Amino acid sequence: MMTLNLVPFVSVDKMMQLVLQLGIERVLIDLAAEIEADFRRWPLFDKTPRIASHSDVGVIELMPTSDGVTYGFKYVNGHPANMRQGLQTVTAFGLLADVATGYPVLLSEMTILTALRTAATSAMAAKHLAPANATTMALIGNGAQAEFQALAFKAICGLTEVRLYDIDPAATAKCVKNLAGSGLRVIPCTTPEEAILGAQVITTVTADKTNATILTDNMLGAGVHINGVGGDCPGKTELHRDILMRSKIFVEYPPQTRIEGEIQQLAPDHPVTELWQVITGATPGRTSADQVTLFDSVGFAIEDFSALRYILAQSQATGLFDSLDMIADPDDPRDLYGMLLRAAG
């Protein structure tokens, strides 16, 4: 009798059920804790810049890592023009596998999960870098990621006000509607200058695959924390170079960020600080109240690994998963052909 080797699969439907059952803010808090725990053991992981296939219209990437016990990867795309066709600009799925056998232990959607883990990572970084007692965030770019960022900063950093700006007023209106009843004071703005007024934290999360200038140096006062999320591939930036020269810059993995992040605008030896070193206490984060700090966030595989491990545990605990007959499992491991023949009979 052939035995089935079933792999847990978290579909989009099951992911939505899981997040809503647990509560979005709880999931964001939990993910931030999981990611921070893995950053604390950063040296244990295999690390490589994401493997990217670029085209004129977007990028398709693989993001692999392993802690020696579990292997994980994410498949993710970025196609800014998709929105004009009614499609997501970013979609993703991910897999975890047992290093000892090579067998997969989870397959999961990651379009929703990537939005959650990106927001959780942003807020985790800000917890270590933002000004003390920050209450207000400017959120520039009000697309698919915006609400997740707002809720993560509320849940993890205690922010109470978010000021919204997007070049498309419909995106801002969507974000205002979705955040109604969130407990945040939500203020729609008509210019980026209006949005950053009084904000101690500024998050940029725009989608265009261009060297854009969302913020210029003369717009920024002293002491702000910038969370640069949108610049995440070669040729795509959001901040004027003068802001970078003025800021203390924190990154995930320098070999990747120097290719994809805001710091692609700078010399290859421009000093940056790795975020994991701040989290472990090996190096200081913000060192003065008037310092401008920048988290040049491009997303790194370890964050996806943390998120997938969290989803594996939560899906098992809640039963919110399906099972896939994904791995051939012949009675005799040497007789794969015989397994195929027996299926015909």
Image (spheres, grey):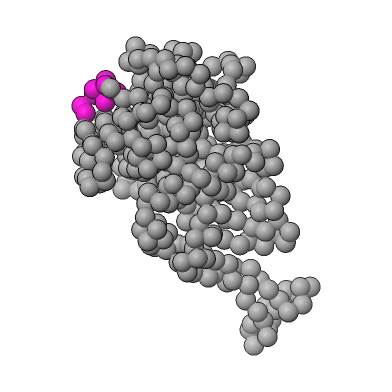
Segment tinted magenta in the rendering: 189-197
Q: Does residue 287 show up magenta in the picture?
A: no
> Of all residues shown, which one is farthest toward the front?
133
Q: Position of residue 242 (x, y in %)?
A: 44, 12
293, 134: nearer the viewer? 134
Residue at 40% across, 51% down: 26
Expressed as whole percent of the image width and height from the top left, the position of residue 139 reads 32, 32
Is 48 placed above or below 330 here? above
Going by the image, does 274 lie left or right of 188? right
Furthest-bottom residue in view?
345
Residue 115 seen in the current view: yes
Percent across and percent down for residue 69 are 69, 53
In this rendering, the answer to whether 135 lies above or below 150 is above
Q: Position of residue 85 (x, y in %)?
A: 32, 46
Q: Residue furthest right?
A: 334
Q: Is residue 83 left or right of residue 327?
A: left
Toward the viewer: 56 or 255? 255
Q: Residue at x 49, y 60 (%)?
A: 314
Q: Is residue 308 left or right of residue 223?
A: right
Is residue 236 visible in the rendered image? The answer is: no
Q: Going 48% across and 33% down the picture, which residue do you hit?
A: 125
Quadrant of image for the C terminus: bottom right
Q: Residue at x 56, y 54 (%)?
A: 309
Image quarter of the N terminus: bottom right
